[in-house]
Amino acid sequence: MSGTTVHIPTLETDRLILRAPALSDFDAYAAFRGSDRTVHIGGPDKRHESFDKLCAIVGHWHLRGYGRWSVADKATGQPLGIVGLMYPDDWPEPEIAWSVYEPAEGRGIALEAALASRAYAYSTLGWTRVVSCVSPANIRSAALATRMGATLERTIDHPEIGKLGIYLHPAPDSMQ
């Protein structure tokens, strides 16, 4: 039985490297997933649940051909978060998602990585529509979506997470 190798591209911004998640990222990811900071995205999780979720992030690339990157500081290599494109089976449509770890909070890391992800979706994947799904209680994520030019299009009731605001990002042709 032969396996298929999935290529996860690396993106670079001024301060960041968006790259394939690695086992060396796991401790930082597990600490994040185990914290109260994940209450709006289905957490907190036990360490073994965090491992399963990190594996799912990698597997998403294999199944969909796109996914979320591990975001690392370009100068130090320190993992700062998980940001990118996702479309789980129970999601309304493909989205740009972001989660940054505590050391990255308030530094514009999520914005920089999310903008790079959106550019990739539009220029490389040819998408013409993308959203971000945000819990109404997650004020900082709603503010980030708005800062990216996204507007609240509608709300949905997700069976596990609850209410989500669906923020529609500007179409690629409107950003030129």
Image (spheres, rainbow, N blue to C red):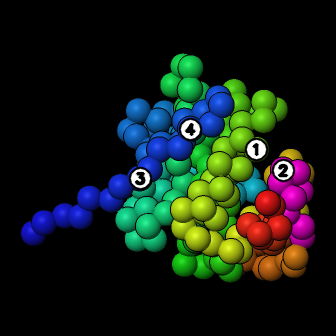
What residue type is disc 2 on? Leu
Q: Disc 4 versus disc 1: distance between alpha carbons? A: 14 Å
| Mark toward the start of the polypeptide (4 vs 2) | 4
Which residue is rendered at x = 69% and y = 50% of the image? 114
Residue 176 at x, y = what percent? 79, 60
Q: Which one is in front, 146 or 88?
A: 146
**Element type where label 1 sits in the image:** helix
- Region rendered in magenta: 144-152
**Of the image marks 3 and 1, the number of the one nearer the N terminus:** 3
Q: Which mark is residue 8?
A: 3
According to the picture, the residue beneath numbered tag 1 turns out to be 111
4 vs 1, front mark: 4
Tell me the residue that label 2 is attached to.
144
For the point 70% across and 70% down, which residue is it? 130
Q: Would residue 103 appear left or right of 145 to someone viewing this image?
A: left
Which residue lies under the disc numbered 4? 12
Give the mark, 4 or 1, whose residue is nearer the N terminus: 4
